[in-house]
Amino acid sequence: MKQNYTAVIKQQGDWWIGWVEEVPGVNCQEASREELLKSLRLTLEEALEMNRAEARLAAGPGFEELLIAA
């Protein structure tokens, strides 16, 4: 299932800075808008995979995964 996330971006001086609203800690800074969006996508993917791994480790053996919608 593909999820959608919201990037909040702005140019500040010579840099583009941005955050992903839904995932704390996902923020980047790049020299161009295109580079920023690419970095945000990569950082988001890495953060989600790390969160998944941590959740599975915390659950231990015998866990169940269910899709939920907000």
Image (spheres, grey):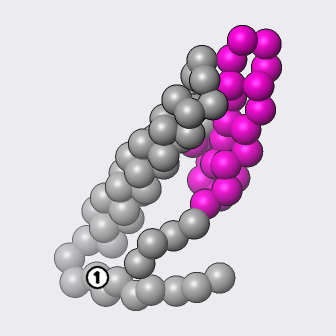
Residue 5 visible here: yes
| Crowd band around label 1 with a 10 angstrom C-alpha radius: few (<14), some (14–19), many (20+) | few
Amino acid under disc 1: Phe
- Residue underneath mark 1: 63
Residue at image point 48% right, 46% down: 41
Quadrant containing the C terminus in the rendered view:
bottom right
Residue 54 visible here: no
In the image, residue 14 above or below residue 57: above
Residue 54: give x, y in percent of width and height.
Answer: 35, 57
Quarter occupied by residue 6: bottom right
In the image, residue 4 above or below residue 62: above
The part of the chain drawn in magenta is: 5-26
What is the secondary structure assignment of the residue under circle 1? loop
17 sits to left or right of 47 = right
Residue at image point 60% right, 23% down: 32
Residue at image point 68% right, 17% down: 15
Residue 23: give x, y in percent of width and height.
Answer: 60, 53
Q: Is residue 17 magenta?
A: yes
